[in-house]
Image: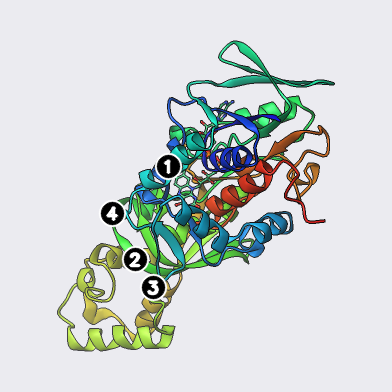
Amino acid sequence: MKVAVIGGGAAGLMAAITAARGGHAVTVFERQARVGKKLLTTGNGRCNLTNVAAAPDRYNGGAGEFTRYALDAFGVEDTLAFFRDLGLVTVTEESGRVYPLSDQAGSVVDVLRLSAAGSGAELCCSSEVSRIKKDRRGFTVTAAGSNREFDAVIICCGGRAGGRVGGTALGYELLKSLGHTCTALYPALVQIKTDTDLVRSLKGVRADALIKLTLWDETIARSAGEVQFTDFGISGPAVFEISRAASVHGAGSRVTLDLLRSMETGEAAEIIRNRIAAMPSLTLENLLTGTVHNRLGRVVLKYAGYDINGSVSALTDGDAAKIAAALKSFTLNVTGTLGFEDAQVTVGGIKTGEFDPTTLESRIVPGLYAAGEVLDVDGDCGGFNLQWAWSSGRLAGQLGGGKRR
Ligand SMILES: Cc1cc2nc3c(=O)[nH]c(=O)nc-3n(C[C@H](O)[C@H](O)[C@H](O)COP(=O)(O)OP(=O)(O)OC[C@H]3O[C@@H](n4cnc5c(N)ncnc54)[C@H](O)[C@@H]3O)c2cc1C
């Protein structure tokens, strides 16, 4: 069969290699000057290519069940074996995240690109597909002004996230033009914007915290780990993990940081009481020195309602308890998130119910397949989104031939 793969990213390269190895004549259309441009930026340039914990429950918003077949058919072990066969040596970190030993995302792109070309796939770069038409004979794909005919098309255009590195809405538009439906889209794995009065002076400060996101007093997401303060709000791995809920629910939610997660409030109050007793001549400015980052300590005191120029000797046991409580529940109002430009993944996409999860073939247009982030599948931070790209790209590239009978 003549097969067009639209998009030369993670899912597209996997689909192209699979289809070409299956004996099909494959053409990859990539709008950017090179394939795998977004891949190059993943994992801070290191490419966190999968996670040993990849399973349907790591995909959000009801997408889990849809991913099950693809992940079962081509899971983490299969992915690692696939890359090993291409010559990529990987390292699995204690967290379960897998990276190339070279620590260079370029290694992942290179082995995929070489394998795609070596398998006989034609790579057409700087070729943006603007239209796909289906008739009884097959598909007409229009790219860079010229038309080509194909028997099957696999759409792997990715999502809107990572706009600076190629994230676009073009895949949704192509699929909508063929009768598919797109859900609402939100940026996720992204920085959270908060009221800036308190955080502005904390720019660059890092803290280890338990994070809780609440909406009308109901906890809607939690995480733990590094938080980085910025001039617009908060960032860092633990923040990314709750950003999906912050993005979908928008302004109105509140983020609460437990800045002393290793101890109970009572223990924290005791530390502060002891400090008050030992150093009554200090001003409040230095009360929390050694407990948390100096700048953070001063901001928490202001948040708790204290004048940092006041004298420590004036503080009571009740004040120690109040300051401890502020350290354990430092709360900021969420005003939104940064946008698709800064996000790592798109929440939402083309409705999964319109595709057969065992083949990824459209239930609306026979011969049309989709894989990767263009579908309404988003995973947790840590390699899960690329695993979906590999698993779904692999399944779609089998063009129905991988279905277990
Ligand atoms: C900064 C950043 C860091 C990330 N880090 C990680 C990480 O470490 N681990 C992880 O698991 N995930 C990570 N992700 C998410 C991951 O990169 C994506 O989920 C994954 O790349 C999706 O694969 P895809 O093939 O669906 O889309 P993409 O990899 O985005 O590929 C889609 C391709 O299609 C092309 N295209 C689009 N429209 C057209 C068209 N009309 N014609 C021709 N070509 C077109 C695009 O140019 C692009 O090359 C990160 C994302 C970003 C933005």
Q: Residue at x 59, y 10 (%)?
A: 145
Q: Position of residue 47 (x, y in %)?
A: 41, 51
Q: Kindly identify which numbered label has been placed on residue 41.
A: none
Label 4 amino acid?
Answer: Gly
Sequence-first tag of 3 and 4: 4
Does the image show residue 300? Answer: yes
The disc, 3 or 2, on the residue closer to the chain's N-terminal end is 2
Q: What type is the residue that disc 3 sits on?
A: Leu
| Comparing labels 3 and 1, the label whose residue is closer to the camera | 1
Q: Which residue is mark 2?
A: 207
Work out how far the residue at label 2 is from the one at label 1, CA to CA, in angstroms.
Answer: 34 Å
Which residue: 26% across, 67% down? 293
**Image mark for residue 204:** 4
Q: Position of residue 106 (x, y in %)?
A: 36, 43
Among all residues in the image, which is located at the extreme top? 145
Per the image, the residue denoted by label 3 is: 327
Is 277 on the left or on the right of 40, as rendered? left
The residues bearing labels 3 and 4 have C-alpha atoms spaced at a distance of 19 Å
Pointer 3 or 1: first along the chain: 1
Q: Nearer the viewer, mark 4 or mark 1?
A: 1
Q: Name the residue carrying label 1.
A: 109
For label 4, the SS is loop
Q: Using the numbered discs, state the Cα–Cα distance from disc 3 to disc 2 in whole angstroms.
A: 12 Å
Q: How is the image coloured?
A: rainbow
> Amino acid under label 1?
Val
Q: Is residue 348 above or below residue 163?
A: below
Q: Quadrant of the C terminus?
A: bottom right
